[in-house]
């Protein structure tokens, strides 16, 4: 992870500024200088295994393998959450700088979303108790690097975090209708879940790809018209 492994940067072709800032926090958490175990960025992003040379000082890190020749350790993070996580409480902040500061100070399991329309630190508590969290169920039916689909069964409203790179071009849909996609826990993607049963979709649809597709189709159309025009002229001239 600390050496730019795929598990941390996901499908990001070029590391973003938020990634570089988050990497510093994760490094501190590994050294035992971050937040409480279970409330750290490395936990929320589901980073279960790390490779290091020195023993880690942070809580919940267990050495599972040591290579004496290479002097490399594989360490397991006991507090890593799964890729898809349900929350009943969210705090809205303005940007990822504020998100980093907020995660450092967490004292309870809370989703940190970024929204320019909401002034920090506004707390959005869906429900006062946590008893309903486990009642929000989902089934993952599509799982690819650029497309996720989940069947949601939510008796009550809540939040869902996808611990996967939040990169420009990602969009979220509920039963085919676009919904707001927030940056969650600095590096992840999050959406607010309304009560009900529905299909939640995450799609990577970068504008660069769409623009390239339009240009290609336009060029192909022009090329077809030019060749078609030449063929018609040639047929007419041969009569």
Image: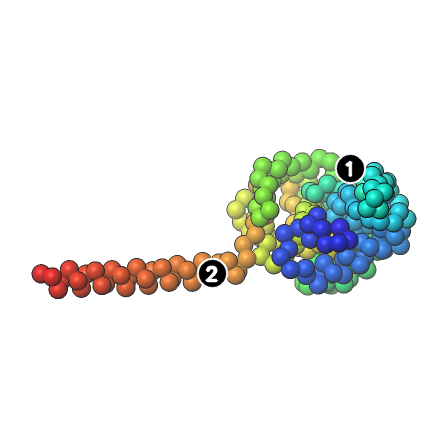
Considering the numbered disc 2 on the image, is that residue within a helix, a strand or a loop? helix
Task: Between label 1 and label 2, give the one nearer the viewer.
Answer: 2
Closer to us: 37 or 199: 37
Closer to us: 158 or 101: 101
Considering the numbered disc 1 on the image, is that residue within a helix, a strand or a loop? loop
Residue 173: horizontal and vertical position, in percent?
57, 48
> Residue at position x 59%, y 50% from top?
172
| Horizontal side, residue 197 vs residue 105: left or right | left
Are there few (<14), some (14-19), or many (20+) residues within 10 Å of tag 2?
few
Closer to us: 205 or 215: 215
Residue 1 against residue 17 in the figure, above or below? above
> Residue at position x 75%, y 50% from top?
1
Q: Which residue is mark 1?
A: 131
> Which quadrant would the C terminus be assigned to in this image?
bottom left
Residue 146: horizontal and vertical position, in percent?
58, 48
**Which residue is situated farthest in the front direction here?**
69
Residue 231: horizontal and vertical position, in percent?
21, 60
> Residue at position x 69%, y 37% from top?
136
What colour scheme governs how the chains and residues are painted in the rendered image of this protein?
rainbow
**Which residue is situated farthest in the left direction here?**
239
Closer to us: 153 or 215: 215
| Horizontal side, residue 175 vs residue 11: left or right | left
Q: Which residue is mark 2?
A: 212
Q: Is residue 183 visible?
A: yes
Residue 223 against residue 51 in the figure, above or below? below
Question: How far apart are the two marked residues, 1 and 2, measured between alpha carbons?
Answer: 48 Å
Residue 54: horizontal and vertical position, in percent?
87, 49
In the figure, residue 140 lies in which quadrant?
top right
Are there few (<14), some (14-19), or many (20+) residues within 10 Å of tag 1?
few
């Amino acid at each position: 992870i600390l050496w730019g492994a795929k598990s941390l940067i996901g499908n990001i072709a070029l590391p973003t500024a938020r990634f570089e800032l988050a990497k510093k926090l994760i490094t501190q958490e590994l050294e035992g200088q971050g937040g409480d175990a279970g409330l750290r960025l490395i936990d929320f992003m589901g980073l279960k295994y790390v490779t290091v040379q020195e023993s880690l000082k942070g809580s919940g890190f267990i050495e599972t393998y040591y290579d004496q020749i290479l002097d490399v350790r594989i360490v397991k993070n006991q507090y890593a959450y799964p890729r898809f996580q349900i929350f009943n409480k969210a705090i809205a902040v303005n940007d990822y700088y504020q998100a980093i500061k907020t995660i450092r100070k967490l004292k309870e399991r809370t989703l940190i979303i970024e929204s320019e329309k909401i002034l920090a630190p506004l707390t959005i508590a869906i429900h006062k108790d946590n008893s309903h969290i486990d009642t929000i169920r989902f089934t993952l039916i599509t799982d690819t690097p650029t497309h996720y689909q989940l069947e949601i069964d939510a008796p009550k409203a809540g939040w869902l975090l996808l611990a996967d790179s939040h990169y420009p071009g990602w969009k979220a849909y509920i039963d085919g209708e676009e919904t707001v996609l927030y940056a969650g826990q600095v590096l992840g993607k999050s959406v607010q879940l309304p009560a009900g049963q529905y299909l939640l979709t995450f799609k990577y649809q970068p504008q660069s790809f769409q623009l390239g597709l339009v240009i290609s189709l336009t060029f192909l159309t022009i090329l077809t018209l030019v060749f078609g025009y030449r063929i018609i002229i040639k047929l007419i001239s041969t009569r």
